[in-house]
Image (cartoon, grey):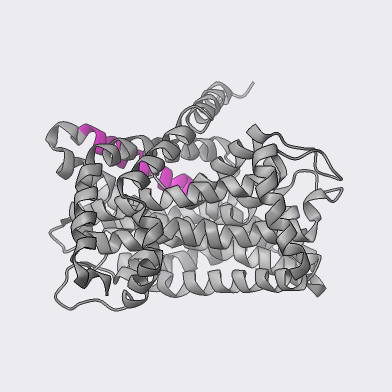
Amino acid sequence: MNAMQPLSNFIDLLDGIVWGPYVLIPLLLTVGVFLTIGLRFQPWRRLPHAFAVMWKGRHHHPDHEGELSPFRALMTSLAATIGTGNIVGVATAILMGGPGAVFWMWMTALFGMATKFCEATLAVKYREVTPDGKFVGGPMYYIKNGLGPDWKWLATLFAIFGTVASFGIGNMAQANAITLNVVNLGSNYGLQLDKEVVAAALFILAALVLVGGVKRIGAVAGTLVPVMALVYVAGSLIVLGIHIDKVPAAFALIFESAFTGHAAVGGFTGATLAMAIRFGVARGLFSNEAGMGSAPIAHATAIVKNPVKQGLLGMLDPFLDTIIVCSMTALVIIVSGQWIAPGIDKDAGILTSAAFNSVMPGGFGMWLVTIGIVLFAFSTILGWCVYGERCVIYLFGHKAALPFRIFFTLIVPVGALAELKLVWNLSDLFNGLMAIPNLIALLLLSPVVFKLAREFFLDPHNET
């Protein structure tokens, strides 16, 4: 018996508890509903205003403080948020929970908008400036500065959880996904690509961006994220345009199955209502990360004076990630009919590729999915480098930033070549554990956000 097996089994047990139906899922949803009501549904009502702020946020006021323009801070956050979950995670939700799971993914995004509004607002309000001029913030800082010194232990816990998660879910897992997809794509065209070559190329690309720090990451994310999202959405719209007659029926199926489940048909084995809710909520939360506490670390870098303005951009995270990008994947899978085709055999990656290939000739669909996974995964590495660096700065001071980025970069090829199931499960566990200190802080500091929001929206100058 493998000596590490007992530890691996224990990690699996803890991971199942934290991400199971009785801890994070109800906690995250409950906090999202509470904050939405407390904000008087402002995140929903102010959605057009938020997009206007995002457009104006490409430029910043010269007298305001921060490191990145509001737009680039949002793109850095989205770089980590939009990932493989938008492609593979959506397919998993449909395979395990049926089309109705998509509806419950939407619900996590709608209520997650309020959660991320609060996270980003608090991140800017309670951020600090390091001796070398870095603007640092996030749950560890709004716990320490908002709740007081008696809560510093909780802030430290978050920073530890975030540091560990950054190496696993934000680095090694993404590098591994990139390598496997590039090698598999090459093999489909008779090219035998060595993993070592792919890992070396990935290492060089990552080093060119990561060692440059948050400003270079923000600059790359500000270009890469909009381009990759637009290309993927455009490819999805081509498929939906060809199947335009099936789109209304797809929406009807999603809403119907959301409250009834779906019987077995074709290659689909069936799903109960409970399965639709469970897998839809779990995959939705995993994709948009609302309440996990990672995104506010990026938003804290924004060059902005009023915290609520960045809160408006923060709430666009789950909307763009889940309502837009995840919905594209889901609709393509459903209208193509591939989710009920025989032979899919519960393989989410095969399902998404098959859905696009059913319409796009010459294997172009497979190229689109593979390139999407590669770019989404690479952007996740960039975003999580910022998250891990800020957690390390909180724990060890600003001088630890450069050594962290160097070490984080060196881990990229290790993840690209490794097959360490324990590492993936451990990082997944710590990613979930990040949410608990953050959610406690959001509930305790919610009166602060409610007050800031009321003052902001009562001022007519803030509507322009």
Q: Measured from the top left, where is residue 164 in percent x and y?
A: 39, 41
Q: Measured from the top left, where is residue 397 in percent x and y?
A: 19, 49
Q: Residue at x 63, y 62 (%)?
A: 328
Residue 170 shows in the view: no
Q: Residue at x 22, y 57 (%)?
A: 124
Q: Nearer the viewer, residue 327 or 435?
A: 327
What residue range appears in magenta? 153-169
Q: Measured from the top left, where is residue 204 in percent x and y?
A: 48, 67
Q: Which quadrant holds the N terminus?
A: top right
Toward which corner of the image does residue 283 lie, by quadrant?
top right
Q: Measured from the top left, where is residue 446 in percent x and y?
A: 25, 43
Toward which corner of the image does residue 309 lie, by quadrant?
bottom left
Position of residue 259 in the picture relative to residue 190 (left or right):
left
- Magenta segment includes 88: no
- Magenta segment includes 164: yes
Toward which corner of the image does residue 444 lie, by quadrant?
top left
Q: Nearer the viewer, residue 50 or 402?
A: 50
Most prominent secondary structure in the magenta stretch?
A: helix
Q: Nearer the viewer, residue 73 or 415?
A: 73
Q: Nearer the viewer, residue 200 or 22?
A: 22
Residue 38 shows in the view: yes
Image label count: 0
